[in-house]
């Protein structure tokens, strides 16, 4: 029976291991380290995740997920452009967290967002931090 096979196979879980290391054991000298911060918003939630990429002198690359976060949006959700701004704001606020934990030096950072609203907002020098972002930053 399928249930009995599953139950007997549970003992193998104690040998199951996932390497959560940012740097592979075979990587001795890291040439570059980069953090890539991604943010996005959908109708139902906002998402962010951070990926660390390490490269050796021999051009070997290893990428690993460092952090992920999501926030479910309730029925009285703001517009998608506001959700995109929220996701980008939260991403920049939590961007410092991996630096406290990673054992790497001279990490380059890149922030990625596919929202034209957020990108236009960042390029706008005339009206830099309007009320929505200012209040959102204070409340979190």
Image: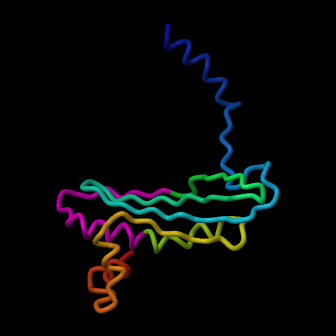
Which residue lies at the image location 27% right of the left edge and 80% below the top edge? Answer: 132
- Residue 47 among those drawn in magenta: no
Position of residue 131 relative to residue 66, above or below, is below
Identify which residue is drawn at 66% across, 49% down.
20
Number of numbered labels in the structure image: 0
Give the x, y percent position of residue 100.
64, 70
> Residue 113: where, in percent of width, then height?
39, 65
> Residue lying furthest front in this view?
59
Residue that sits furthest to the top in the current view:
1
Residue at left 61%, top 71%? Answer: 108
Q: Position of residue 124 (x, y in %)?
A: 32, 85
Which image quadrant is residue 105 in?
bottom right
Residue at 50% x, 7% y is 1
In this rendered view, identify the residue nearer to me: 139 or 50: 50
Q: Is residue 111 rendered to the left or right of residue 47? A: right
Residue situated furthest bottom in the rendering: 126
Please identify the residue farthest to the left as the structure is shown: 76
Q: Quadrant of residue 91?
A: bottom left
Give, as a single range, the part of the protein colored magenta. Answer: 68-90
Which quadrant does the C terminus fall into? bottom left
Residue 78 among those drawn in magenta: yes
> Is 124 placed left or right of 99 in the picture?
left
Residue 78 higher or lower than 20, as above or below: below
- On the rendered structure, is 67 left or right of 41? right
In this figure, which colouring scheme has been used for the structure? rainbow
Residue closest to the eye, 100 or 41: 41
Point out residue 118 in the picture as x, y percentages from the top left corner: 33, 73
């Amino acid at each position: 029976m399928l249930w009995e096979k599953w139950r007997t196979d549970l003992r193998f879980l104690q040998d199951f291991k996932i390497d959560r290391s940012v740097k592979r054991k075979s990587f001795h000298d890291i040439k570059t380290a980069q953090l890539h911060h991604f943010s996005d918003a959908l109708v139902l939630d906002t998402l962010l995740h951070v990926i660390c990429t390490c490269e050796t002198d021999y051009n070997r690359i290893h990428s690993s997920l460092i952090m992920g976060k999501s926030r479910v949006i309730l029925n009285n959700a703001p517009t998608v452009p506001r959700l995109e701004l929220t996701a980008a704001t939260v991403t920049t606020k939590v961007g410092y967290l991996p630096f406290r934990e990673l054992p790497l030096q001279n990490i380059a950072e890149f922030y990625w967002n596919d929202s034209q609203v957020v990108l236009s907002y960042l390029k706008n020098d005339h009206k830099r931090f309007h009320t929505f972002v200012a209040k959102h930053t204070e409340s979190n």
